[in-house]
Image (cartoon, helix red, strand yellow):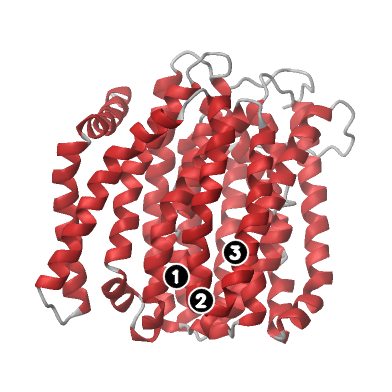
Amino acid sequence: MNDMTTPIEAAAPDGLGSRVVKAVMWRSGSQIIAQISMWASTFFVIRLLNPSDYGLFAMTQSVLVLLSLLNGGGFAGALVRAETITTKDVRQVFGLLVALNVGIALLQIAAAPLAASYFKHPLVGELLVVQSLLYLANPFIVLPSALLARSMDFHRQAKVNLLAAAAGALTSILCALSGFGVWTLVFAPLALVWTRAIGMTVAARLLVWPSFHLAGAGATVRFGGAMLLSAFLWLIQTQADVFIGGRALDPHHLGLYTTSLFLAQILTAKFIPPLNEVAFTAYARLQGRGEAAYAFEKSVRIIMMVSLPFYFGLATTAAPFVQTMLGPKWIEAVPIVAILALAMPFVTLQILFTPATTALGHIRIQVISSAAGAVIMPLGFLLTVRGGATGLAWTWLTAFPILAAFTAWIAMPIIGTSAAALARAVTPPLLAATGMAIVVELVDHLIAVQSPALRLALLVGTGGITYAVLALLVARPVVAEIIALFRSERLARA
């Protein structure tokens, strides 16, 4: 990267469909493998730590997530969306990322005593000081990831992500066994993030100096600024529960709530965002080609086909799942998990609109949607916090459907789809998942199994078979689309 003005090529439009299939397979496949290792370590660690450890950690996250929105990911996103970029553009974005992340690391260190005072726990301040090291790794993750995504080269990202997940999982297990307590939840992410930073830099062969001269970077700054505003508003709606509940609930009950939310959000937080990375790049390449609506509707069909049985299954098996995976000391989380699981389909649908509208040049849609959420969700949490952790969970199930409907209303004209098309995409998997949930509930009531593990195995097996049969009966075209997706990838490899 010596020539400052030589264009850096993006993924070519020709063969875009094949590139998207490969990207989805690499990104989702690696995510599944990485998450399996992370889940194994997470559930192992949850059994060793106490709910209060997760409550203290959640208090730090309300600060960490607030400042993380300033990490500059939106500026790197401008590189993905742009038709052409040069080394100068890359260096300018790198400079922005370095300046922002060093700044927010220092800001978090300065704010740590205030956070400890707000939450009335001195340890919160100590945790935040160490967690500031996370920000310093961001420039070496965000920029290489954007450049690899621009060329739709997700296989190298996948390898790095797998290595980083292994480093994080191993660190968490060793720390938990060594009696590190809540510090386990700090050191494991540090190991994961810094492994990923080094790996991504090597994978992207990124050897440039940051530039702090921003002349000619107006478009990048405007796009990144809009993404920053949207991220800030999204933060308000998603972190208001911990911010409000952190003072109203004790660490034990806050830990029950945040761990339940983690379980319910496994798909929306761990699998949908990586797929949205691929979708953003694909939508950006589809600008002006009139194919965005078809691509969006297809993504909704496929993702709902995969996610709805998980959400409905988690809701119906919450009791044996929590008893088996987390242990008896987490039994109070059962109703919280069930309520949150039923809210997640609306969350999934809402966030699927983001890559489509943003990549098509309408970042204002994301900003407006996030602004609505920043009003609706905090108000809901303020009204329900008196009901404790369960009350906070009910806000997700009652308020998020309203937010998802509003987002769909403002985004559908931009994408070129309609409410009828969206209903056609969602209905088949919804019918199959609902039928599965009914059968699982009936089996659970008719067959009494004392062992939580055996009960969970019976219900999961029943649900899997039932969903497969119902999917073939009421959603055969969607099943065919998923099979065709995998076949296309195998043919592309041949």
Residue at the extreme left of the image, as rendered: 447
The local secondary structure at tag 3 comes to helix
According to the picture, the residue beneath numbered tag 2 turns out to be 389
Q: Is residue 58 left or right of residue 326?
A: right
Front label number (1 vs 3) = 3
Q: Is residue 157 visible?
A: no
Which one is in front, 374 or 319? 374
Image x and y of residue 332, in percent: 40, 82
Residue 467, position as x, y percentages in the image? 19, 49
Give above or below for 100 relative to 13. below
What residue do we see at 69% from left, 41% from top? 367
Mark on residue 380?
A: 3
Question: What kind of residue is marked 3?
Answer: Gly
| Residue drawn at x 28%, y 29% as measured from the top left | 481
Quadrant where the C terminus is found in the figure: top left
The amino acid sitting under disc 1 is Ser
Q: Position of residue 385 (x, y in %)?
A: 58, 75
Residue 478's quadrant in the figure? Answer: top left
Query: In the rendered image, is residue 404 in sight?
Result: yes
Q: Which mark is residue 260?
A: 1
State if disc 1 and disc 2 touch (CB < 8 Å).
Answer: yes
Mark 1 or mark 2, which is nearer the start of the sequence? 1
Q: How far, Cα to Cα, is label 2 from label 1?
A: 9 Å
Q: Residue at x 56, y 41 (%)?
A: 407
User: Where is residue 398 shown, x and y percent of the image?
Assistant: 49, 59
- 3D distance between C-alphas at marks 3 and 2: 13 Å
